[in-house]
């Protein structure tokens, strides 16, 4: 792999037709990012399914790659996109969200400065339909997040983490080693976050890194997302995987 490819951040976006019209806003937020000299981004957009409704919204840019595949949910779409990931770092960007100014450079700096840090997250603002934003309490202290810290908070606070999986920036090799996003109908990104926290140190930036769009069509606003029986089952398997990873002593990096 050439040096140029190594110095690339992969942006991974799963999209389906209802959210496709938000892609230009996500693209604008990505184009406004400033990276250190020698670094670039490559945006992988993966449609969850095969329709003719998404492609018209995909930006015409050589730094953007669009693929389609069998529908299986956002986790499946993101994992299929990883087949084309040609850099060492992966940044999640949901189709309906927007990156905040400077977040890619901050995430990159945190992981480049400390080889023991496997992933980074940042503060989130809800982006409301009227264009206003709203934060929420509970952010951790900025800086390093130790192994197990997010998992314990999540278990003690009704399965609500104090960092948001939609802001993840992660080393590609670590993401792949953990199997990526979990095979769940929802909360697949929470499952990845908990697995990351069980095996590696993370980083939290108190500066806003993401505008998390709230709109009627988003998956987390649907009644099925909060149906108790399924939600309990999702949380059970997310917790079980993270705890077994910790119990087995899996660690990143492999030598401390």
Image: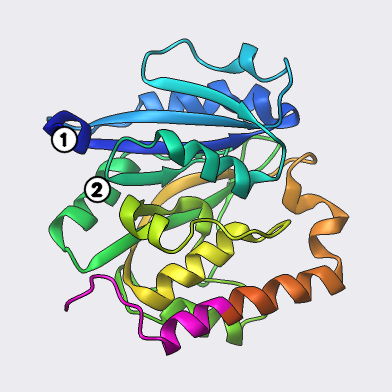
Q: Do the residues labelled 1 and 2 touch (CB within 8 Å)?
A: yes
Give the colour scheme shown: rainbow
Question: Hey, which quadrant is residue 28 in on the image?
Answer: top left
Q: Which residue is drawn at 27% across and 45% down?
A: 88
Is 216 within the magenta?
no
* Quadrant holding the C terminus: bottom left
Q: Element type at marker 2?
A: helix
Q: Nearer the viewer, residue 218 or 173?
A: 173
Element assignment for label 1: loop
Determine crowd level at label 1: few under 14, some 14-19, many 20+ residues with C-alpha closer than 10 A.
Answer: few
Up-down relation of residue 5 to residue 182 (above or below): above
Boundaries of the magenta span: 241-256
Q: Where is residue 253 in the image (x, y as percent from the top left)?
A: 23, 70
Q: Is residue 201 above or below residue 4?
A: below
For residue 108, the mark is: 2
Q: Where is residue 38 in the image (x, y as percent from the top left)?
A: 13, 30
Residue 117 visible? The answer is yes
- What number of labels is visible? 2
Regarding residue 205, the answer to whether it shows in the image is no
Asked if residue 160 lies left or right of residue 196, the reply is: right
Q: Tell me: residue 164, above or below residue 252.
A: above
**Front residue (pair 122, 129):** 122
Residue at 40 percent of width and 44 percent of height: 91
Q: To which residue does mark 1 refer?
A: 36
* Magenta-colored stretch includes residue 246: yes
Picture residue at 55% right of the left edge, 77% below the top = 241
Q: Left or right: where does residue 93 sit relative to residue 170?
A: right
Give the percent coordinates (x, y) of residue 164: 51, 60
The residue shown at (18%, 35%) is 1
């Amino acid at each position: 792999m050439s040096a140029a490819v190594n110095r690339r951040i992969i942006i991974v976006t799963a999209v389906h037709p209802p959210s496709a019209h938000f892609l230009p806003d996500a693209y604008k937020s990505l184009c406004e990012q400033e990276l250190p000299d020698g670094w670039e981004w490559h945006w992988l957009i993966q449609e969850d399914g095969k329709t003719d409704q998404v492609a018209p919204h995909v930006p015409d840019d050589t730094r953007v790659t669009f693929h389609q595949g069998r529908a299986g949910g956002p986790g499946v779409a993101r994992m299929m996109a990883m087949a084309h990931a040609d850099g060492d770092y992966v940044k999640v960007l949901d189709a309906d969200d927007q990156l905040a100014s400077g977040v890619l450079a901050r995430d990159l700096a945190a992981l480049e400065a400390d080889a023991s840090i496997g992933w980074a997250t940042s503060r989130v603002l809800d982006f409301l339909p009227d264009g206003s934003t709203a934060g929420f309490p509970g952010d951790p202290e900025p800086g390093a997040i130790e192994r197990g810290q997010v998992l314990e908070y999540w278990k003690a606070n009704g399965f609500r983490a104090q960092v948001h999986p939609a802001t993840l920036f992660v080393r590609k090799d670590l993401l792949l080693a953990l199997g990526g996003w979990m095979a769940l109908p929802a909360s697949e990104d929470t499952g990845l976050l908990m697995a990351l926290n069980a095996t590696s140190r993370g980083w939290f930036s108190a500066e806003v890194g993401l505008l998390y769009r709230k709109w009627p069509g988003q998956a987390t606003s649907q009644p099925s997302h909060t149906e108790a029986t399924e939600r309990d089952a999702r949380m059970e398997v997310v917790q079980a995987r993270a705890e077994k990873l910790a119990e087995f002593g899996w660690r990143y990096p492999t030598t401390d």
